[in-house]
Image (spheres, rainbow, N blue to C red):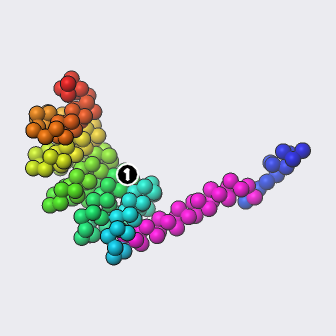
Amino acid sequence: MIGCFDSMRTEREDPMNRVYAERLRRGHENLELFIGQLNHRGISYRVRAAEALGNSGDEKAVMPLIFCMMNDPETEVVYMAACSLGKLRDRRAVQPLISKLKSSEKWVRRGAAKSLGIIGDREAVDPVSELLSDEVPEIRAAAAEAIGMISYWDAVDRIIPLLEDPEPEVRVSARKAVRMLGRGDLAD
């Protein structure tokens, strides 16, 4: 007979509904807390806040992360904000990320390229392609993978020369990219 009364419980009385509601409430509170920490004077706080916002999956984090990426003076923070924008996969981040492809900091260029690849907007193909000739091997590798992730088939010819790059990391990324672009025959 106890089971008969289960259907009489209201949503408010159901313990699982209370748990879910509390988790949702805390998620919103944490989001605001992390957004606020993007302005903390400590670099490690800003880095962790940017990372947490990227992991939140909440679109409300996009604009604060863009602002942080465009204005924070610390490379580590800008890199993490760029990576977090990729995790959120929001097209509003495309132009700001494209602007960071010209950064003098290799980590910022790398994070921006990877995030543009994850977002997958074809608008990024030409700007990312410019990094295929970057002097830093990690940047060339990130650019090749980003173009592969964007799945812009016409760009495969831009990646083919990297299959012969002197750096192993670049060759591996180029092979991965041409496979993603449907030209695995070139990667072997």
**Is 38 left, or right, of 129 in this rendering?**
right
Residue drawn at x 65%, y 57% as measured from the top left:
19
Q: Nearer the viewer, residue 108 or 148?
A: 108
Residue 114 on image: x %, y %: 27, 48
Q: Which residue is mark 1?
A: 87
Q: Is residue 153 visible?
A: no
Residue 69 on image: x %, y %: 29, 64
Residue 58 on image: x %, y %: 45, 57
Q: Tell me the quadrant of the picture where the C terminus can be found.
A: top left
Q: Is residue 47 visible?
A: yes
**Residue that extends furthest to the bottom in the rendered view of this protein:** 41
Q: Give the quadrant of residue 144.
A: top left
Q: Assess whether residue 16 is covered by the magenta stretch.
A: yes
Q: Tell me the quadrant of the picture where the N terminus can be found.
A: top right
Quick one: label 1, few (<14), some, or many (20+) residues within 10 Å? some
Q: Give the quadrant of residue 104.
A: bottom left
Q: Nearer the viewer, residue 20 or 170?
A: 170
Residue drawn at x 13%, y 50% as measured from the top left:
136
Q: Nearer the viewer, residue 169 or 178?
A: 169
**Residue that extends furthest to the right in the rendered view of this protein:** 1
**Is 69 left, or right, of 136 in this rendering?**
right
Q: Give the vertical position of 116 relative to 46 (above or below).
A: above
**Is 164 left, or right, of 70 in this rendering?**
left
Residue 108 on image: x %, y %: 23, 58
Name the dominant secondary structure of the magenta segment.
helix
Q: Give the vertical position of 158 relative to 29 (above or below).
A: above
Q: Give the quadrant of residue 141.
A: top left
Magenta stretch, residue numbers: 13-38
Q: Amino acid at mark 1?
A: Lys
Q: Assess whether residue 110 is covered by the magenta stretch.
A: no
**Tag 1 secondary structure:** helix
Residue drawn at x 29%, y 40% as measured from the top left:
149
